[in-house]
Image: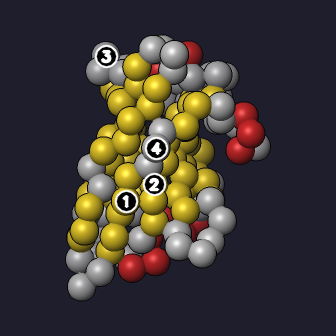
Amino acid sequence: QLQLVESGGGLVQPGGSLRLSCAASGFSLDYYAIGWFRQAPGKEREGVICIRNSGGVTNYADSVKGRFTISRDNAKNTVYLQMNSLKPEDTAVYYCAAAPIPWCPLMTNDFRSWGQGTQVTVSS
């Protein structure tokens, strides 16, 4: 029933920017916290950033603070991840996920619905 679809990934040079979108269907984002995660080759999946239903933000990864911004447009049922000053180490598959609670979870298993991911490659 619930579906999340990421888009906006691609190849970008170091220092460049990308804007990822997470479009939800089958449910309203009004009642969910939405998190962005990423998994780099050979590494475990890590949380990046999360936004609660009221708009409050929780940063999971210190490495993206000041560079990545999460936002939501409830009217469009979409969450965005604006990524600036991209670095090669940001290269990963990026996933969005939904938690059925109005605040950002501390545990990954509270995110129950996941998208298929979108590839972000930062390379010159």
- Label annotation for residue 47: none
**Residue 65 seen in the figure:** no
Residue found 32% across the figure and 74% down from its top: 122
Q: How far apart are the two marked residues, 2 and 4, measured between alpha carbons?
A: 9 Å
Q: Nearer the viewer, mark 2 or mark 4?
A: 4
Q: How far apart are the two marked residues, 1 and 3, measured between alpha carbons?
A: 26 Å
Quadrant of residue 63 in the image?
bottom right
Residue found 45% across the figure and 14% down from its top: 26
Q: Does the CB distance between marks 3 and 4 fall below 8 Å?
A: no
Q: How far apart are the two marked residues, 2 and 1, measured between alpha carbons?
A: 6 Å
Q: Nearer the viewer, mark 1 or mark 3?
A: 1
Q: Which residue is mark 3?
A: 75
Q: Which residue is mark 2?
A: 94
- Amino acid at circle 1: Gln
Q: Residue lying furthest bottom in this view?
A: 124
Residue 113 in picture, x, y percent from top left: 58, 31
Mark earlier in primary sequence (2, 1): 2
- Secondary structure at badge 4 equals loop
Q: How far apart are the two marked residues, 3 and 2, measured between alpha carbons?
A: 23 Å
- Secondary structure at badge 2 equals strand
- Amino acid at circle 2: Tyr
Figure check: 55 above or below 59: above
- Label annotation for residue 119: 1
Q: Does the CB distance between marks 2 and 1 fall below 8 Å?
A: yes
For the residue pair 96 and 1, the one nearer the viewer reads as 1
Q: Which residue is mark 4?
A: 116
